[in-house]
Image (tube, helix red, strand yellow):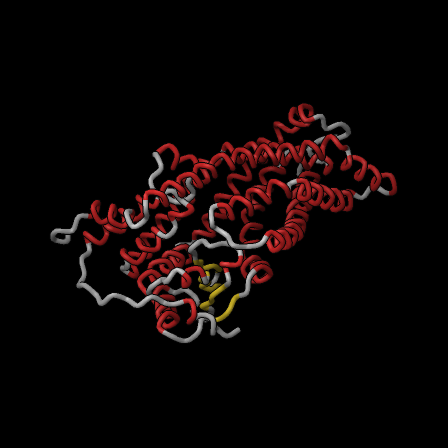
Amino acid sequence: MAQGFDAAAATATYLATLTPEQHAKATAYTQGGHWLLLWGTLVSIAVSWIVIRSGVLVRTRGGIEAKQPRPWLAVLVVVVVDTVLEGLLSIPWDAYAGWWREKSYGLTSRAFGGWLGEHFLQMAVGVVATLITFSLLYWLIRRFPRTWWLWSGLGMAAISIIFFILGIFLIEPLFNSYKVAPPGPMRDEVVAMANQVGVPSDKILIYDGSKQSNRYTANAGGLFGFGRVAMSDVMFKKDADLAEVRGVVGHEMGHYVRKHILLGALETGLMTLIGLFLVDRLFPRAAGLLGAKGVTGVADPAGLPVISVVLAILGLLATPLSNTFSRWAESDADHFSVVHFDEPDGLAKALVKTIEYRADSPSAVEEFIFYDHPSVRARVQAMMAWKAAHPKAEQTPLTPVKAGAQAEAPH
């Protein structure tokens, strides 16, 4: 234990770098987000109910079957119609939750037109992903009418991995510009870190994350040797020094090395299996309550909004469980970072910068239900406890890495 070092006092000092007004604003934003989760679920249910009551999906499916019974074609058309309709009906809510509220709290500087254009692009990507997923789902329902939910849960684990890899290499470049980090101390440091822990070091990238959000973030994505380290330009606009870069990037590398994506896929598969088992049992009652006239059963693609409603409710109820897994993964990545790169102060400084969108000291109940990351206070406390247990010689203060140094990044 370091002589004279008080981890609790050091934690309090870090948290005190924000004013009481900044903490109050962060708390208001965070707790408002809890209500957003509930209202978002209710909006999703209402939108699905509108589509159900309109009867448009039943008529669409009936029109296709009247010509020639082709279940696969009925699924394709109905899924596209439903996804587009629900996406359009949800735009007012999405605009409030995803743009207006973020802008009102200073977490984005994007104009509404830019947000809306990107939202339509997200909808297009979502249509394709939903079409693939539910085409497979309805095929399994037809092929295995009694055990489809079991095979669907197993399949979702594999699909989530495939979508993750496709997201890195095909989807994310649709929304952001990724550039190779320019030569210099920061890039050299990240390459050395990657080589040290076995993360691919040939793709060290900077992306224009500030286009969407002012949040301070980075990520190390990939699987099976394919991957990249990507840092948002927000990190450098907020004058991140090399200690912070090491702490944050080390955390993201922890996700890669510790295979959290694979574990997350297993968790997704298990949750999907349980959820679809309940869908199978609850579908007839849910369809009746929602007034889904003309829907013949769970195998009928016109009943897709019924499945959506049941899954929305189950997803809300399962929030504490999914958040518990996520908090474990984040804590594990923090531990990986500090063990391998020994930058407790760097990570602590970076964590404090996230308080503007994540209140630092929730109650135990609030954290268990709503937080997908451990509280900032708990994470900084863990870093200071590590520092107390692993003292090292004082180092020369590190020079912040300025945003201007990234502006010259080549394609």
Q: Residue at x 33, y 60 (%)?
A: 244
Q: Quadrant of residue 340?
A: bottom left
Count the marks: how many? 0
Residue 359 drawn at (x, y percent): 38, 42
In the image, is 390 to the left or to the right of 333?
A: left
Which percent across, then down, holds residue 322?
46, 40
Q: Nearer the viewer, residue 101 or 268?
A: 101
**Nearer-the-camera pick, 402 or 296:** 402
| Pick the front one: 137 or 173 | 173
Residue 339 shows in this picture: no
Side (left or right) of 37 relative to 341: right
Above or below, 322 relative to 18: above
Q: Residue furthest left?
A: 3
Instruction: Report the side of 285 relative to 386 (left or right).
Output: right
Residue 326 visible from this viewpoint? yes
> Residue 173 in the image: x percent, y percent?
57, 62
As drawn, is 272 to the left or to the right of 303? left
Q: Position of residue 270 (x, y in %)?
A: 51, 40
Query: Which image quadrant is residue 349 in?
Result: bottom left
Residue in the image at 66% along x and 44% along y: 87
Q: Quadrant of residue 184?
A: bottom left
Outermost residue, right side: 67
